[in-house]
Image: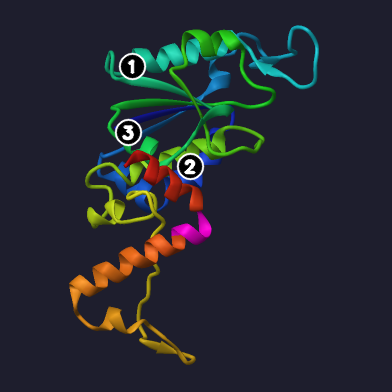
Amino acid sequence: MRFDIITVFPELFTGVLDCGIIRRARQSGLADVRLVNLRDFARDRHRSVDDRPYGGGEGMVFMPAPLFEAIEACLGSGEKGKSRVVLLSPQGRPWSQGLAAEFSTIPHLILVCGRYEGVDQRVIDHLVDQEISIGDFVLTGGEIPAMVLLDSIVRLIPGALGCPESAANESFSSGLLDYPQYTRPAEYRGHTVPEVLLSGDHARIAEWRKEQALEKTKRARPELINERLAQN
């Protein structure tokens, strides 16, 4: 799977690309991540990519020309008809585990990191397939959201995780939060692991985990229960 990340700060991604699952996925050829410096497509000696908005107002807006050329360059070097252009923006659709699973099946993702007051609307109208937000808050730019998408997608690529069941049995995959987890020792400072987990009875353990996940979701994220009921 290929990722093209269009940004004015490619250096921000260095640590993310060189650690953990993403590093291993890149080394094994499961994920091809390419950083595209938007300033390489600027048209003046100052490498300008933004300008003041028409109609007045605060801040700066990404100009259309550099973004058009950067996105088109990425589209042109990918497999025809197998690319999706995604703009990271506070106005976008909220990111979710379901979207991560959907995006993990797309051969080529072009992630455009918005910044400043946004991007020229003509870019959105003519080149962007989808706007994505990681929450109802504003960040300095789209680089951190791009990292969030990259991490959550790569781990769902078949072969990226050491244990394939890990992605299927975690929070949100079943519409519920994850059940509590315990490891050794069985007793620590007087605090013990639930007896059922030590019983070796897999049917009882599965039932306990299901009950705990449901209870935890009701307590922490009750809206997920309502969404689950609405789907049934």
The magenta region covers 217-221
Residue 61 located left or right of residue 42: right
Pick whichever of labels 1 and 3 is earlier in the sequence: 1
Q: Residue furthest bottom?
A: 190
Judge depth for marks 1 and 3 and give the one in front: 3
Pick whichever of labels 2 and 3 is earlier in the sequence: 3
Q: Is residue 181 above or below residue 165?
A: below
The residue under label 3 is 102
Residue 53 located left or right of residue 80: right
Please tell me the numbered disc located at residue 77.
Answer: 1
What is the spatial separation of the Cα atoms under label 2 and label 3, in whole angstroms?
15 Å
Residue 215, position as x, y percentages in the image:
43, 64
Amino acid type at image mark 1: Ser
Q: Which quarter of the rendered picture does the N terminus lie within?
A: top left
What is the spatial separation of the Cα atoms under label 1 and label 3, in whole angstroms?
23 Å
What is the spatial separation of the Cα atoms under label 2 and label 1, in whole angstroms?
24 Å
Residue 93, position as x, y percentages in the image:
50, 29
Badge 1 marks a residue whose secondary structure is loop
Residue at the (34%, 56%) spot, across then down:
170
Label 3: few (<14), some (14–19) or many (≥20) C-alpha neighbours in 10 Å: few
Badge 2 marks a residue whose secondary structure is helix
Pick whichever of labels 2 and 1 is earlier in the sequence: 1
